[in-house]
Amino acid sequence: MSPMAAELLIRPARETDLATVAAIYSAGIAERIATFETSPRTASDLADWIGDGQPFLVAERGGQVVGWARAGDYSDRCVYSGVGEHAVYVDPQARSAGLGRQLLEALAAAAEEAGLYKLTSRVFTDNAASRAAHLAAGFTEVGVQRRHGRLEGEWKDCVLVERLLGPAAEAG
Ligand SMILES: CC(C)(COP(=O)(O)OP(=O)(O)OC[C@H]1O[C@@H](n2cnc3c(N)ncnc32)[C@H](O)[C@@H]1OP(=O)(O)O)[C@@H](O)C(=O)NCCC(=O)NCCS
């Protein structure tokens, strides 16, 4: 059976996943479409992500980790402790098969379970895949932050995306 035909499992990340998570992250960083970060990541760079109580999921197909999503702190101000700032990365070989959307949906469920009331992130306006995956997973685009940073000297505009969870989603 080909890896793409195998069943998809989305589960909490483990320490043994970190090398693959870092490789998938580094592939996205190298594409210069996902983040202002430009340095590749190693497993040890991400060690703090395990066991910190924040939602951190991997997608596994045929025993191989093919994507990940994580929510970290949005702010160090305690009034925003219910807001998570998230990221989602899928192996370039595994894209456009619904994994990004499914990881975001699973992350929203895990974040809600962890007591968060919102997930939010910034997406480069020209990252069509991420914008589409977020919209498909129930996120809304709040607005554009112009010239929010420079990537290799070029100004980038960012779309702020968010999804309300739990009591915030129910408040109407
Ligand atoms: C963004 C990313 C996670 C999306 O993952 P994915 O598995 O390819 O996305 P999905 O297959 O779940 O696609 C979800 C939707 O986006 C659409 N889509 C996927 N790739 C697209 C593209 N390049 N352009 C336009 N739409 C696209 C799909 O058609 C699908 O829409 P639908 O549900 O209406 O059919 C993936 O492209 C990636 O890892 N990119 C590099 C890292 C990155 O940019 N991360 C996000 C940082 S904000």
Image (spheres, helix red, strand yellow):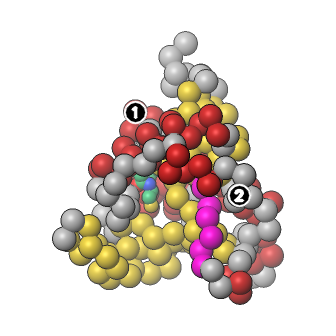
Q: Position of residue 43 (x, y in %)?
A: 51, 43
Q: Nearer the viewer, residue 89 or 106?
A: 89
Whether residue 59 is visible to the viewer of this picture, yes or no, is: no
In-image side of 5 versus 39 (left or right): right
Q: Residue furthest top?
A: 1
Which residue is at a point 45% across and 70% down the rendered structure image? 122
Above/below status of 167 relative to 103: below
Whether residue 135 is visible to the viewer of this picture, yes or no, is: yes
Q: Quadrant of the N terminus?
A: top right
Q: In what element is the residue under mark 1?
A: helix
Question: Is residue 72 located in the magenta-colored stretch of the structure?
Answer: yes
Which residue is at a point 39% across and 38% down the rendered structure image? 92
Residue range corresponding to the magenta coloring: 70-75
In-image side of 51 versus 125 (left or right): right
Above/below status of 100 relative to 74: above
Q: Nearer the viewer, residue 66 or 140?
A: 66
Question: Is residue 118 located in the magenta-colored stretch of the structure?
Answer: no
In-image side of 74 versus 82 (left or right): left
For the stretch drawn in magenta, the main secondary structure is strand
Q: Which residue is mark 2?
A: 52
Q: Residues within 10 Å of mark 2 (few under 14, many from 20)?
A: few
Q: Quadrant of residue 64?
A: top right
Q: Position of residue 16 (x, y in %)?
A: 62, 34
Q: Quadrant of the C terminus?
A: bottom right
Going by the numbered disc 2, the residue's amino acid type is Asp
Q: Which residue is mark 1?
A: 93
Q: Position of residue 70 (x, y in %)?
A: 60, 55
Q: Residue furthest left?
A: 153
Above/below status of 117 relative to 13: below
